[in-house]
Amino acid sequence: MPLSRRQLLQSAAAAGLAPLLPRRLVAETAIGPGRLITVSDGNLVLPGDFIFAGMPEAELSGILAARGIDRQRLTPECNVTLWQEGERTVLFDVGAGPDFMQSAGALQENLAAAGITPEEVTEVVFTHAHPDHIWGLLDEFDEPVFPGARYLMGRAEWDYWWDPATATSIGAERQLFALGARRRMEAIEDRIERFEDGAEILPGLSAVLLPGHTPGHMGFELRHGAEAAMIVGDAIGNDHVAFARPGWAANSDQEPELAARTRVALMDRLALEQMPVIGFHLSQGGMGHVERVADGYRFVPL
Ligand SMILES: [Zn+2]
């Protein structure tokens, strides 16, 4: 069942004003001379069907029960990744900003709490253009939050959301996602830098196309010699069913079958290489490892 923005907002409103998670810097690791941290943007409040609609209910309920997940009401963390190395401070996505959900949009205050000013951010790199990832580009006065940053987005993702036809082809339940993305993208149109799959967009940072959640969704592999980590955005969108059954189609993905194939291949690689994973909506700050178990995978937080 597709969910309207109205239903999503009602669900958020029902959660009330109280933040559900401590709002702070949440996880940290080192890759070579650089450090990777995640900073909380708050959390989303979603009806379970946003992800689970269409999944086999009997098996699903066992997976969720084992992890203490409420089938009806999800409160996923939103963790923005920040990479600092030398003079460079790179943000991966910018959070939801003031207009999406009351429970999200806390990135600015949490960056400040971590001692990082918006002016320090040298690059903003987008995984994809969904509201919880790009709406935080502008503040409540429609001014860019990160005034000195370069902006980088995968070419296919930019082209998809820039196309005016997307707002009509995307489906009623995501139409406002399209209009909202386009409005933010117009604010950076004259300085966006687009890149392709496989490009080394910054020294040590390579783009990895992970399509399906959105048509041009990108992940990023940060590598320094043998040390590496993979920023997966929403290609792995949760740490319960996406790990337990990565091959299941999820309603939260725009192209569910393609997203499932992407997720299966990605899980396999991350488990095989034991590469740390950083996911926007994974729990406990979003950093961890992928561990293969008998009938799927398991998220092991750092
Ligand atoms: Zn997301």
Image (cartoon, rainbow, N blue to C red):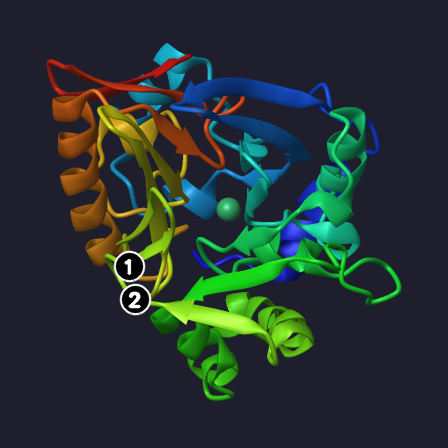
Q: Which residue is rendered at x = 65% and y = 31% of the image?
A: 40
Task: Name the residue rendered at 36%, 57% in the picture.
Answer: 217
What is the distance, in whole Å, between disc 1 and disc 2 at their CAs?
6 Å
Q: Position of residue 115 (x, y in %)?
A: 77, 27
Residue under label 2, please give it: 196
Task: State the residue at coordinates (66%, 70%).
Answer: 184
Quarter of the image with the N terminus in it: bottom left
Q: Residues within 10 Å of mark 1 (few under 14, many from 20)?
A: some
Instruction: Return the residue at label 1.
Output: 199
On screen, residue 141 above or below 85: below
Asked if the residue at tag 2 contacts the one at tag 1, i.e. Cβ–Cβ closer than 8 Å, the answer is yes
Q: Nearer the viewer, residue 2 or 89?
A: 89
Q: Position of residue 275 (x, y in %)?
A: 25, 25
Q: Is residue 90 visible?
A: yes
x, y percentage for residue 116?
Answer: 74, 34
- Under tag 2, what secondary structure? loop
